[in-house]
Image: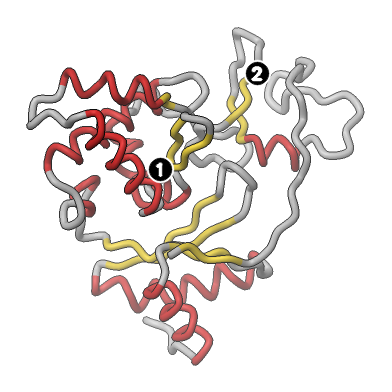
Amino acid sequence: MSRELGDGHRRFLQTLMAVVFYFLQCIPDKLDDFIEAINSRLQPMFMQIRKGMSEENGRQYYALVNMAETDITRMTSDYADNELELFRKTLDLIVSSENGKASSTDILNSTDTMTSKKLKKSETEHLLTRLVQDNWLCERRGEYTLSTRCIIEMEPYIRTMYQEQVKVCHICHNIAFQCQICENPSCGIKIHNPCVARYFKGRVEPHCPACDDFWPHEIPEVRGLRSQSKR
């Protein structure tokens, strides 16, 4: 039976409808029940609130997702067919890379293999700027990564299309692109950078949580949290 929604539920849902995704600092167990109550009402409308983690700072974000739309079809109202083809090629580059990144040079070169209308260099650069502005990609020093929004909304598609390549974090069990990898050849687990920071915090000699080998990578600092939303 669907739970009754209070004013708090309605305000939270209205916020998600007004922004692309939202970060909220709250007690996790209470928040999970809070989201579950809203999702029980959204289910008949094929909508769902999903949670995802920023691979950059470890913050938890929430997005309102249309479940009736599949994979990249949710982007068809905003992008042309050839633009979506280049986005898929960018996704291919990012997922297949070791570090979860695709350089602008590699993305520009991938236009040579497009089957739809080829994009010019200036058109490709403009498209990449739009994808960053729309929170599908992130860019830093000429390298592109998947945004938190993209990971939340595209996770089922990514898990289906890249079953052999997708990496899963050993700590939080979500797909991981920005991560550290155990160097033991018989282990090789992946851990998100923020999960690494939290798991190894305060440990003098970090060891792999799976095989107990020494963890040789630099341990990042746990970053502070603050509420924010993305439009």
Residue type marked 1: Leu
| Residue at image coords 27%, 18% | 109
How packed is label 2: few (under 14 Cα within 10 Å), some, or many (20 or more)?
A: many
Compare residues 34 and 83 and report the one nearer the observer. Answer: 83
Q: Secondary structure at mark 2?
A: loop
Q: How many marks?
A: 2
Name the spot of residue 91 as percent of width and height, x first: 33, 32
Looking at the image, is 75 positioned above or below residue 31? above
Q: Mark 1 — residue?
A: 137
| Residue at image coords 68%, 69% | 27
- Give residue 105's quadrant in the image: top left
Callout 1 touching callout 2 (CB < 8 Å) = no
Name the spot of residue 97 as percent of width and height, x first: 43, 20
- Give residue 95's quadrant in the image: top left
Looking at the image, is 123 positioned above or below residue 17? above
| Residue at image coords 38%, 82% | 2
> Which image quarter holds the N terminus?
bottom left
| Residue at image coords 19%, 40% | 83
Q: Mark 2 — residue?
A: 182
How packed is label 1: few (under 14 Cα within 10 Å), some, or many (20 or more)?
A: many
Q: Secondary structure at mark 1?
A: strand
Name the spot of residue 209 as percent of width and height, x first: 72, 28
Q: How does the figure colour the protein chain or chains?
A: secondary structure
**Position of residue 184 in the picture relative to residue 200 (left or right):** left
Residue type marked 2: Cys
Q: Among all residues in the image, which is located at the extreme top?
A: 185
